[in-house]
C-alpha cells in the first residue's frame, strides 16, 4: 500500500542516501494546486496589521478548511446528542458519525481494526495513557525506557513520572551534529532490560524524519515494545502502523486540519485488551456493583464519560480532506517547499539552521537563529509583517541545551503554503536585521 511504500522510501533514504533514485520514486502524482487549496481556508484571507497573513506556525497547529468548521456546526445544529447511550434518532446519528470517524482514522494509518483506535484529547494524553495504563502494569525497578535526545516534552515527562514511580530508568539515543540519530549505538542501548522504546517519527524542532521502522525492528529483536510520537508525522506523510509494526502511535487532530481537543492513541489490540483502564467513570464499564466493576470492550474501555463527539466527527472530515488530496502529494509538496526555504535562508548572513541539510531527510519544519536577534524579538517583528512563526524552546528544553541555545525561531509549512510566502519571510528577516542591527 502507499503508506508502507513511502515508509520504505524514507528508510532507504536515511540508510543509503540514494537521493536521486529515491526522489523519483515518490513523484507519481500531479502537484497540489495551492491556489485552489487556499480557497478552502477562510482564515488565510485575514490581514494582520494591514498585511496579508503568512501562516508559518503549522507545527504548533494547522488552520482548518471550511468543511471542518461546517462539520462542527452541522453536528450541533442537526444531530446534537450523546453517543452509545440513546435509542432515539439523534443519538443513533451521532453514534454512527462518531464511530465512522474512528474508522477513518484506522484507514488513514493502515490499522487492521477501528478497535485499535482510542480517542484522547491530544498526543500528550495518548502517551500518558500508555505510561500509566501499560507502564504501571509492566515496568519495575531496573527496567529501561529508551528515548531520544530530540523528544518533545510530551514524550519525555510522562516517562520521567512513571520511571520515578516504578523504579525504571531512562536512557537516550544520541544524535549527530546534523540532527540525525546516532543509530550506531542502538543495539548497545536496547538490551534485555529495555521494555519500551519511545521515539518521535519527526522532530518538531529539527524536522528530522527518523527511521522508526528500523528502530522498531531492533526493539522487536530484543523483546521491547515501541511507541511512536506521530504528532508531526501523521499530518504530513503516509504512515502505516502495520508496515512499521509499532505497538503504539500517538497523534493529534489539530495539527492535521482538524479541531483542537481530540487526539488518537493507536495500539495493538492485544495490548489494549491486557491494559487496565486509564480513567474511570461512565461508558468505560460493562457491569458495576458497589464493590467491583468489569470493563467495556476496547476501545471504549479507555473512553470514560461523554467523549469529544463534535470534534471527533469534524476530525473525520479533516481526514476526508487530506485523503482526497493524498498524503504522498502533501509530503512531496512540503519537501519542495522545505528545499526552497533552506536554499533561500542560507543566503542570509549570520543565520544558523538546525537539523539535516537535505530536505529529503526532514519535514517542513525549519528552526533557526539569526545573528544576535533573540527569537522572541524576531517573532514579534515578523508578526508586524503579517508573518506568524513560533519562537521559544518548542517544548523541547533538553534538545535546546543539546544544541547550545536557549530558544530558536521556527517556520513550519503545510499544504496551503507556497514559495511566495517563503520569499516574504526572507525579505522580512532582512528588514529585521536592519532594524535590530543597524550598525552592521
Image: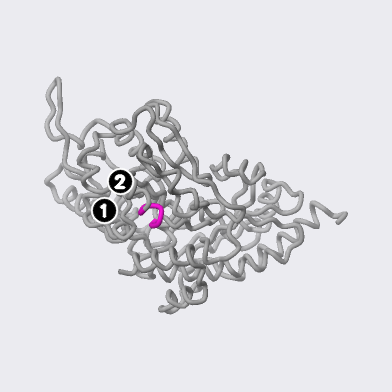
Instruction: Tell which of 47 and 129 is nearer to you.
Output: 129
What is the count of numbered marks?
Answer: 2
Q: What is the x, y in percent for residue 328?
A: 41, 69
| Residue 330 position by quadrant | bottom left
State left or right for residue 233 relative to residue 278.
right
| Residue 146 position by quadrant | top left
Residue tagged by mark 2?
119
Q: Reading the chain from its start, which is encountered first: label 1 or label 2?
A: 1
Locate the C terminus and report the quarter of the image it occupies.
bottom right
Residue positioned 64% across, 48% down in the render:
408
Q: Over which residues does the magenta segment extend?
A: 213-217
Dot 2: element: strand
Does the magenta stretch mainly form a helix, a strand or a loop? Answer: helix
Distance from label 1 to label 2 (Cα)? 8 Å
Q: What is the x, y in percent for residue 91?
A: 18, 47
| Residue 238 position by quadrant | bottom left
Local packing at callout 2 (Cα closer than 10 Å; few below 14, some 14-19, many 20+) is many
Q: Which mark is residue 388?
A: none
Magenta span contains residue 275? no
Q: What is the x, y in percent for residue 334?
A: 51, 66
Q: Where 189 sits versus 256, above or below?
A: above
Q: Which mark is residue 102?
A: 1
Q: Residue furthest right?
A: 439
Circles 1, 2 touching at the beta carbon (< 8 Å): yes
State left or right for residue 197 relative to residue 289.
right
Locate the N terminus and report the quarter of the image it occupies.
bottom left
Dot 1: element: helix
Residue positioned 23% across, 54% down in the render:
97
Instruction: Tell which of 310 and 15 is nearer to you.
Output: 15
Amino acid at each position: 500500500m502507499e503508506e508502507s511504500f513511502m515508509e520504505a522510501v524514507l528508510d532507504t533514504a536515511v540508510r543509503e542516501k540514494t537521493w536521486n533514485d529515491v526522489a523519483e520514486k515518490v513523484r507519481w502524482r500531479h502537484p497540489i494546486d495551492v491556489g485552489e487549496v487556499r480557497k478552502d481556508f477562510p482564515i488565510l484571507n485575514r490581514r494582520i496589521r494591514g498585511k496579508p497573513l503568512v501562516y508559518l506556525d503549522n507545527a504548533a497547529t494547522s488552520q482548518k478548511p471550511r468543511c471542518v468548521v461546517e462539520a462542527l456546526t452541522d453536528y450541533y445544529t442537526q444531530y446534537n446528542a450523546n453517543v452509545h447511550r440513546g435509542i432515539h434518532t439523534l443519538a443513533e446519528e451521532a453514534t454512527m458519525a462518531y464511530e465512522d470517524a474512528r474508522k477513518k482514522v484506522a484507514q488513514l494509518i493502515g490499522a487492521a481494526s477501528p478497535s485499535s483506535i482510542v480517542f484522547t484529547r491530544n498526543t500528550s494524553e495518548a502517551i500518558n495513557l500508555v505510561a500509566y495504563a501499560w507502564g504501571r502494569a509492566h515496568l519495575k525497578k531496573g527496567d529501561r525506557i529508551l528515548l531520544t535526545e530530540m523528544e518533545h516534552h510530551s514524550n519525555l515527562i510522562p516517562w520521567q513520572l512513571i520511571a520515578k514511580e516504578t523504579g525504571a530508568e531512562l536512557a537516550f539515543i544520541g544524535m549527530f551534529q546534523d540532527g540525525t540519530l546516532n543509530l550506531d549505538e542502538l543495539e548497545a542501548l536496547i538490551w534485555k532490560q529495555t521494555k519500551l522504546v519511545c521515539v518521535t517519527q519527526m522532530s518538531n524542532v529539527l524536522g528530522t524524519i527518523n527511521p522508526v521502522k528500523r528502530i522498531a525492528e531492533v526493539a522487536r529483536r530484543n523483546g521491547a515494545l515501541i511507541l511512536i510520537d506521530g504528532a508531526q508525522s501523521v499530518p504530513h506523510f503516509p504512515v502505516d502502523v502495520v508496515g512499521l509494526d509499532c505497538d503504539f502511535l500517538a497523534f493529534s487532530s489539530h495539527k492535521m486540519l482538524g479541531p483542537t481537543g481530540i487526539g488518537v492513541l493507536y495500539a495493538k489490540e492485544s495490548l489494549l485488551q491486557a491494559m487496565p483502564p486509564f480513567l474511570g467513570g461512565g461508558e468505560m464499564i460493562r457491569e458495576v456493583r458497589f464493590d467491583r466493576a468489569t470493563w467495556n470492550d476496547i476501545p471504549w474501555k479507555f473512553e470514560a464519560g461523554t467523549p469529544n463527539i463534535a470534534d471527533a466527527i469534524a476530525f473525520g472530515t479533516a481526514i476526508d480532506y487530506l485523503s482526497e488530496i493524498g498524503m504522498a502529494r502533501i509530503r512531496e509538496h512540503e519537501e519542495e517547499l522545505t528545499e526552497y526555504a533552506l536554499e533561500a535562508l542560507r543566503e542570509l548572513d549570520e543565520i544558523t539552521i538546525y537539523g539535516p541539510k537535505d530536505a529529503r531527510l526532514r519535514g517542513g519544519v525549519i528552526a533557526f537563529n539569526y545573528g544576535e536577534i533573540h527569537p522572541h524579538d524576531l517573532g514579534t517583528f515578523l508578526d508586524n509583517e503579517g508573518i506568524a512563526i513560533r519562537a521559544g524552546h518548542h517544548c523541547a528544553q533538553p534538545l535546546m541545551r543539546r544544541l547550545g541555545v536557549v530558544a530558536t525561531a521556527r517556520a513550519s509549512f503545510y499544504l496551503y503554503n507556497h514559495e511566495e510566502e517563503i520569499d516574504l519571510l526572507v525579505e522580512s528577516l532582512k528588514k529585521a536585521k536592519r532594524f535590530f542591527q543597524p550598525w552592521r
